[in-house]
Amino acid sequence: MEETLYTDLIASYLSGNIEAAEREQLWAWVEADAANRTFFDEMVQLWGMSADTKRENFATDTQVAWSKVESRLFGNAINTPIVTLQPQSSKKIVPLSIKRGWWAAAAVLLLAMAASIWMYVQPFENQTIVYETSENERRLYTLPDSSKIWLNENTRLSFDKNFEQRIVQLEGEAFFNVTDLDGKQFMIRSGEATTTVWGTTFNVRAYPTEKNVEVTVETGEVALSKTKNANKTVLLKAGKSGVFDKKTEEVKLVEEEIENADAWKTQQLEFDETPMSEVVQTMERYYGVTIKVENPAILSCPLNLAKDSPNLQQMIKTIEFSLPVQIEKQDSIYIIRGKGCN
């Protein structure tokens, strides 16, 4: 469109990126119509105000005022002579309000220019990198220090671009393989809980809607603590798990191993004489479902099972075959019934 073309030419002129041929085209357009001149003068004034400079009276002496702007923008580097703009008082000046579409375009243009300048001058070290996953999405990322992270679904991980302090913010669940950098610590902050490591593999589950932050260590050693009180810290070795209770703000070691903590990553479920009380919790987490057990005696039934990428229906059939129970779905809830185990 013609309006967009000349708005772009004005922007190029004001930013100092206009070619000689484009400059002549712009002057011809300004001379052609009083409304064009008015719009042009208003743009120059707006540019002057945006640069925090003294507003010139372009309406009365456009040539002089524009020469000052020209000097401010280009200094002594101007080789192309300015075309003289003769006053045209004999023509009727069309109010700028008639050109509302152009004025809107000009406002958008200057805002965009200001935003670009602001983005350019911001310190790069203050920029934040964000990795996110949505429903049923899992992704692998490599951090600036070569550490690898696997994000479970509905997870958000953020950190400063320079990554000098090796600190990340986590909402959701992630498996970390942290690179050892000569003893330089790596920290994961999840609300009021902080996980500190130096070079190890572990899983952190920290969904905002859940009551606990849970850390399970695969290799090495991990420290789990209350963010604002380092005295509340537990050290977790390989095969151990710890939780931070959001309500009590207590950090504690989990006595029994949390099986299948990283099943979402490995896509494997393994149960070795695991009581159904734990199997139910694992299935609820893995499949994102709600399960209710009618007979408490069922919860003590042990289950032996190892499956790769099992779907929910496969798991239900395997459990029904292995134990004296029946599982049926009512609305969105799975009900486990049976006599249980002695």
Image (tube, grey):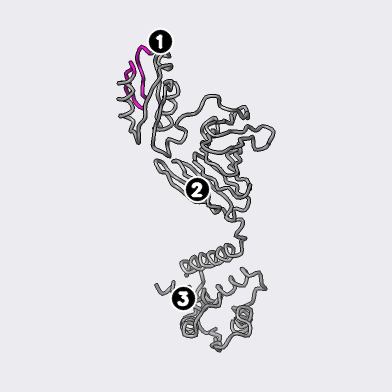
Percent position of residue 301, x then y? 40, 17
Does the image show residue 158?
A: yes
Marks 2/3: CA–CA distance? 50 Å
Q: Which residue is mark 1?
A: 342
State the mark number for residue 148: 2
Q: Earlier in the sequence, mark 3 or mark 1?
A: 3
Q: Give the overall secondary structure of the magenta segment.
A: strand
Q: Are marks 1 and 2 in contact (CB under 8 Å)?
A: no
The residue at the far top in this view is 342
Q: Quadrant of the C terminus?
A: top left
Tag 3 residue:
6
Q: Which element is circle 2 on?
A: strand
Q: Residues within 10 Å of mark 2 (few under 14, many from 20)?
A: some
Q: Earlier in the sequence, mark 2 or mark 3?
A: 3
* 27 falls in the magenta region: no
Q: How many marks?
A: 3
Q: Quadrant of the N terminus?
A: bottom left
- Say whether residue 60 is visible: no
**Residue 64 in the image, given as x and y percentages of width and height:** 62, 84
Segment colored magenta: 323-340
Residue situated in front as seen by the camera: 127 or 244: 244
In the rendered structure, which amino acid carries the disc numbered 2? Lys
Query: Relative to residue 251, is residue 133 depicted above or below?
Result: below
Q: Amino acid at mark 3?
A: Tyr
Residue in the image at 63% along x and 70% along y: 51
The 10 Å Cα crowd at callout 1, few under 14, some 14 to 19, many 20 or more, is: few
Residue 244 location, quadrant = top right
Mark found first going from the N terminus, 1 or 2:
2
* Near-viewer residue (292 or 253): 253
